[in-house]
Image (tube, grey):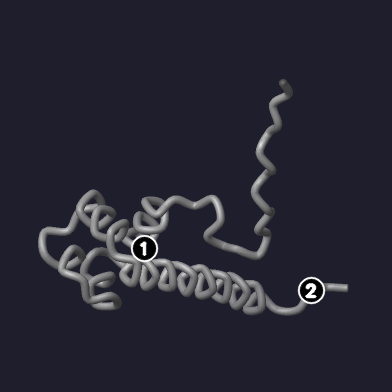
């Protein structure tokens, strides 16, 4: 009897969320915006009333629409960070050459 290995999951090079845990997403958002800023952007009680990563993860894992909002904000934050980095490079002036 030969055992077959399951096929490897497809590569997702364009998916910014691939391989990132929900906890890492939430932690990055809290580091960037803080709990008050996060509650302002996504009005969830778990972000505004005695917020914690643990309680927020519990809600986000049970509530697909809330998780989608958090993931969308994370992707927006990544794009914003990339733009800020590009703007910083352009502000230095043209490359000598």
Q: Residue furthest front?
A: 1
Q: Is residue 41 left or right of residue 10?
A: left
Q: Position of residue 50 (x, y in %)?
A: 11, 59
Would you place residue 77 above or below residue 23 in this image?
below
Question: Residue 48 placed where, x, y %?
Answer: 15, 68
Quarter where residue 97 is shown = bottom right
Q: Spot the residue most to the right.
A: 97
Q: Position of residue 58 (x, y in %)?
A: 24, 53
Mark 1 and mark 2 residues within 8 Å of each other at the beta carbon? no
Q: Residue at x 83, y 73 (%)?
A: 96
As helix, strand or loop, the secondary structure at mark 2 comes to: loop
Lateral position of residue 65 relative to residue 94, left or right: left
Tell me what residue is drawn at x 73 percent, y 23 percent. 2
Mark 2 Cα-neighbour bin, 10 Å: few <14, some 14–19, many ≥20? few
Q: Which residue is mark 2?
A: 95
Viewport quadrant of the N terminus: top right
Q: Earlier in the sequence, mark 1 or mark 2?
A: 1
Q: Which residue is mark 1?
A: 29
User: Horizontal and vertical percent for residue 19?
Assistant: 54, 50
What's the residue at 30%, 60% (across, down)? 60
- Give the CA distance from mark 1 to mark 2: 34 Å
Crowd band around label 1 with a 10 angstrom C-alpha radius: few (<14), some (14–19), many (20+): some
């Amino acid at each position: 009897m030969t055992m077959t290995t399951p096929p490897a999951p497809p590569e997702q090079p364009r998916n910014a969320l691939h391989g990132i845990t929900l906890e890492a997403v939430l932690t990055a958002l809290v580091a960037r915006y803080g709990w008050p800023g996060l509650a302002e952007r996504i009005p969830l009680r778990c972000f505004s009333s005695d917020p914690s990563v643990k309680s927020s993860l519990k809600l986000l894992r049970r509530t697909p629409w809330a998780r989608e909002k958090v993931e969308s904000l994370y992707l927006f934050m990544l794009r914003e960070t990339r733009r800020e980095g590009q703007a910083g490079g352009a502000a230095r002036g043209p490359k000598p050459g």
